[in-house]
Amino acid sequence: MFPFLSRCNMALRRVPALAAALGRRSCCSKPSLPPDFVEALRAVVGAPSVSTATAVREQHGHDESMHPCAPPDVVVWPQAVGQVQELAALCHRCRVPMVPFGTGTGLEGGVNAVQGGVCFDLSRMDAIAELSLEDFSVTVEPGVTRKALNKHLRGTGLWFPVDPGADASLCGMAATGASGTNAVRYGTMRPNVLNLRVVLPDGRLLHTAGPGRQPRKRAAGYDLTSLFVGSEGTLGFLTQATLRLHPLPEATAVTIASFPGVGAAVACTVQVLQAAVPVARIEFLDEVMADACGRFSGMGLPVAATLLLELHGSRHSLAEQQQQMEEIVQQNGGSSLAWAEGLEEREQLWSMRHNAWYAALALRPGCQGYSTDVCVPISRLPDVVVETKQDLQASSLTGPMVGHVGDGNFHCILVFNSQDPEEAQRIHAFTQRLGRRALAAGGTCTGEHGVGLGKRALLQEELGQEGLDTLRSIKAALDPYNLMNPGKVL
Amino acid sequence: MAALRVLVGVKRVIDFAVKVRVAPGGAGVQTQGVKHSLNPFCEIALEEAVRLREAGAAAEVVAATLGTRASQETLRTALAMGADRAVLAELGEGVAAGPREVATALAALARRLQPHLVLLGKQAIDDDCNQTGQLLAAMLDWPQGTFASRVELEAGAVRVQREVDGGLETLRLRLPAVLTADLRLNEPRYATLPNIMKAKKKPLELLPAAELGLPAGPPRLRLLRLQEPPPRAGGEKVDSVESLLGKLRQAGRI
């Protein structure tokens, strides 16, 4: 059997100061695996699909967040749902924790195996099936990423619009309730998942909308699909998702507008939505972010609060939307608009925005990044953003802002020196204040990234005791031994 | 500019994302039930032709392919991307057709349709031959601009920027000419549903390949054998440099 490896040393190797600042509980007291357990895993999926190598386990013990790496004891690669069921039943019998793994691109430590156990790397299950062009639906397994799906759909006239930036696993996106730049028009993951094939913690198979069904709407029983979307691996394995597809727009146009201040940019957003312009993407960059992005991409943007806008429609409706947009932008003191309609130009503008993370890190080379993720009602957005900027300045923190303002959701990309405990402490305090500011404004502490490891306390404040107790009842009903991704969400 | 006609040659190939497998018997690769799509470089060539028409520099874009009846779906994609009409030079099932056969068919089509410009992808992703454009230009005795990364039409001529080993070369070719598209020429559009529906009504002509002069003699290439590379064996850890050298010598590597 494998010797127990010192979790503390490995976990605290990354970002020691922040770990201390966050007050993470020590997880040194984890039981080792039962004897012959790894052999039993090999018997299910074959020896090449089981690994206890240190490098492999460490790779599966972290995502893109700054939570310290917490490797699992074993990594397995099931190739079919039957194997997932057998492995889950085995872990359930032996009371071993289980952690689902897709692409590892999460931002809240969702895959960190804080209590060890078995990491189920589901990427080898990568079938795309049941594509129906008339029903606008398709079924995908966890190994299919959103870019791979859209490439597969090339030539059909359909696409899957949820775009969280990373080329994430679609089932992983369902597990975290992902969103992205297109949510303002096409919705987040939740309305775009029609059915899920879930392996429950004891190995039973559940189809949340019934096997083989994908009605566009249903009123049949409690909405299990919606329960599992955003469950962050704590209720079961999402081994297949049936997704809602959308028709590709006939014409697209993108533009950038600079504003005299944050308030003006956000007010413009509110008016665009109130005017019912069916804007497809409306992204906000504060002046620090605009400057960073402009320099990083070599495109040179004015150092001012900026909106990046995209419109979708037929040729006629696009022209009308463009005109409405120009009027509203002008009314709010925005710059005059130049529209990019060719594919290459549009991609250039959006890649400048999508590189925001790297552009922010480039402001202070050698530092780490952490993204906040609050979402507030749009009416409160101007105040919350302005107060947050003041807080950043008062705390002397580098935190360029980028946001899906159409949803009231914005991210502060905090760039900090992880070796400096005092700065880590200021970061932690700032994020707590920001979370509470959002809650006080009637919003949520996490619009799209999930609760994961770091926001459990804020979840309690957000939902209240009754809310949290209800979540715990559901968790206890489906996972009484707390084996599914323990230590997350609740 | 006179009514400029562009002929675009396209090919139906196994989709780039598919894991290709050797068919039982080793006589080819598995194609049954496998996803096929429009060759990516042909897509780029087609996109360029459609952009020329949208800019008013060309009047008509004709997409053509040499293949079995299944290639109709590829031509419908080309029509959905903006081609005005399409021609399928139909081959029987199991008839081999390489660059020489494709170039023969396209040359015959070019003599019929009288295009001012022929655009092809630089190569197909299944055989990577990179020969059809060059053979076609020779058969027609037209100038050629291969690996094009930029195309500009002028009066009676075309200015082509080519990606070559040493960098970028710009040529000015008298029309009619043959060009082959390289990766950086453009980013092809995605076909939208309204265009896919319109494409169903656009003309798609079926011609037997024999009418275009095929077969032009017996096939010159015969596939002897096709096999997958051996599966990857596990690595081995050694504890010293001497041991490493010993193992490498044993394996005949040094």
Image: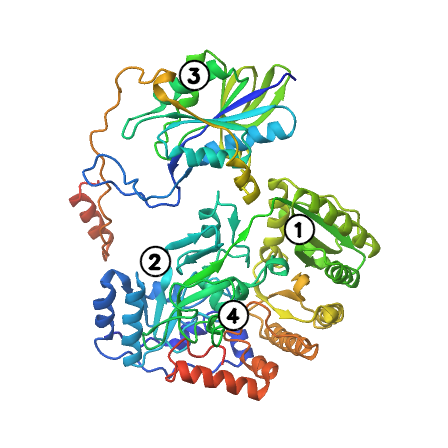
| Distance CA(mark 2)–CA(mark 3) | 46 Å
Q: Is residue B157 left or right of residue B252?
A: right
Is residue A399 visible in the rendered image? The answer is no
Q: Is residue A4 left or right of residue B176?
A: left
Which residue lies under the disc numbered 3?
B107
Amino acid beneath label 3? Ala
Q: Is residue B185 left or right of residue B231?
A: right
Which residue lies under the disc numbered 2?
A124
Amino acid beneath label 4? Glu
Identity of the residue drawn at 52% across and 78% down = A20
Secondary structure at numbered mark 3: helix
Q: Residues within 10 Å of mark 2 (few under 14, many from 20)?
A: some
* Dot 2: chain letter: A
Whether residues under marks 2 and 3 lie with C-beta atoms below 8 angstroms apart, the answer is no
Which residue lies under the disc numbered 4?
A108
Instruction: Tell me which label, 2 or 4, sits earlier in the chain.
Output: 4
**Residue B109 percent coordinates (x, y):** 45, 18
Which residue lies under the disc numbered 1?
A310
| Distance CA(mark 1)–CA(mark 3) | 44 Å
Q: Residues within 10 Å of mark 3 (few under 14, many from 20)?
A: many
Where residue B160 sits, quadrant-wise, is top right
Amino acid beneath label 2? Arg
| Distance CA(mark 2)–CA(mark 1) | 35 Å
| Distance CA(mark 1)–CA(mark 4) | 28 Å
Instruction: Tell me which label, 2 or 1, sits earlier in the chain.
Output: 2
**Residue B4 percent coordinates (x, y):** 59, 19
Q: Nearer the viewer, mark 1 or mark 4?
A: 1
**Residue A173 percent coordinates (x, y):** 49, 63
